[in-house]
Image (spheres, rainbow, N blue to C red):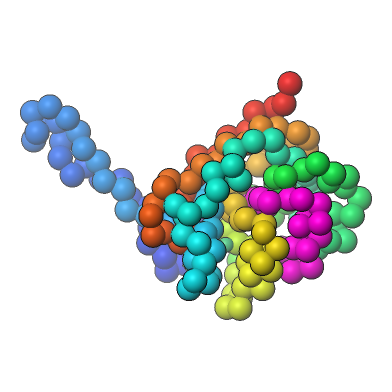
Amino acid sequence: MAVWPGDTPFSYRLTWTKEETGSVNVGRVTMSTHTGTHIDAPYHFDRDGKRVSELDLDLYIGPVRVIRLHRPAGISRRELEGENLEGVARLLIRTDAWPDKSVFPGEIPPVHPDLAPYLEEKGIRLLGLDLPSVDPLDSKALPAHHALTRHGVHILEGVVLDRVEPGEYELAALPLPLAEADGSPVRAALRPLE
Ligand SMILES: N[C@@H](CC(=O)c1ccccc1NC=O)C(=O)O
Ligand SMILES: [Zn+2]
Ligand SMILES: [Zn+2]
């Protein structure tokens, strides 16, 4: 899994082996909170924002709509206007713009901040993408992160949607209850509805 350039690489190592303890292997994991499929807590980009353990778990479990925008230049309200999003609380967008997840992308289609009020209007509270960020990779101001948060839309990044067809699913993508954290890896799973 590629990590953000310069960020902590993932590692799993044994602290103790079964031979050493006489009973068990005990591992340790070192990783960035933004590794692989993960959620951003508002604290990631706002000093006073909510930490992971303060987030509502209902955001990350329940019915979800998957839509496909094939390699868009960007993701704005215009790209979504053809979709009927009535009754959708969670939205995943498959862009296929990060095909090889073992290499960090050079460029990604950014979310336009105008999407945030549009999603709020539709009642969407979770936006997930198959991309490592919702903003341009070189952005410091992070306008989409801030706009989404201001409009009550929570962020799920790095979702693997390679073989997922558009439709209605059940989503589970629960963060770990890390008390102070700015983000958390999740195990994301989709199950077709009915
Ligand atoms: N906003 C990106 C992450 C991000 O910006 C980042 C992640 C790890 C290390 C540095 C980062 N950003 C800026 O220097 C995200 O939410 O995943
Ligand atoms: Zn992140
Ligand atoms: Zn992010």
Q: Is residue 117 magenta?
A: yes
* Residue 153 image offset from top left, x and y in percent: 67, 57
Q: Is residue 53 left or right of residue 173?
A: left
Q: Which residues are magenta?
A: 107-131
* Residue 150 image offset from top left, x and y in percent: 66, 67
Direction right: furthest residue = 82
Q: Is residue 85 above or below residue 154?
A: above
Q: Ligand 3 shows up in which quadrant of the image?
A: bottom right
Q: Is residue 12 left or right of residue 23?
A: right
Q: Is residue 175 left or right of residue 111?
A: left
Q: Residue at x 81, y 56 (%)?
A: 121
Q: Evaluate whether residue 13 shows in this view.
A: yes
The quarter of the image holding the C terminus is top right
Q: Residue at x 61, y 56 (%)?
A: 155
Between 101 and 167, which is closer to the camera in this rendering?
167
Q: Residue at x 57, y 78 (%)?
A: 140
Q: Is residue 127 magenta?
A: yes
Between 142 and 68, which is closer to the camera in this rendering?
142
* Residue 52 image offset from top left, x and y in percent: 47, 55
Between 194 and 137, which is closer to the camera in this rendering?
194
Task: Tell me how many marks there are.
Answer: 0
- Find residue 90 and report its image quarter: top right
- Find residue 120 and report its image quarter: bottom right
Q: Residue at x 41, y 59 (%)?
A: 181
* Residue 37 image offset from top left, x and y in percent: 53, 48
Q: Evaluate whether residue 94 shows in this view.
A: no
Q: Is residue 51 above or below residue 23?
A: below
Q: Is residue 175 above or below residue 81?
A: above
Direction bottom: furthest residue = 141
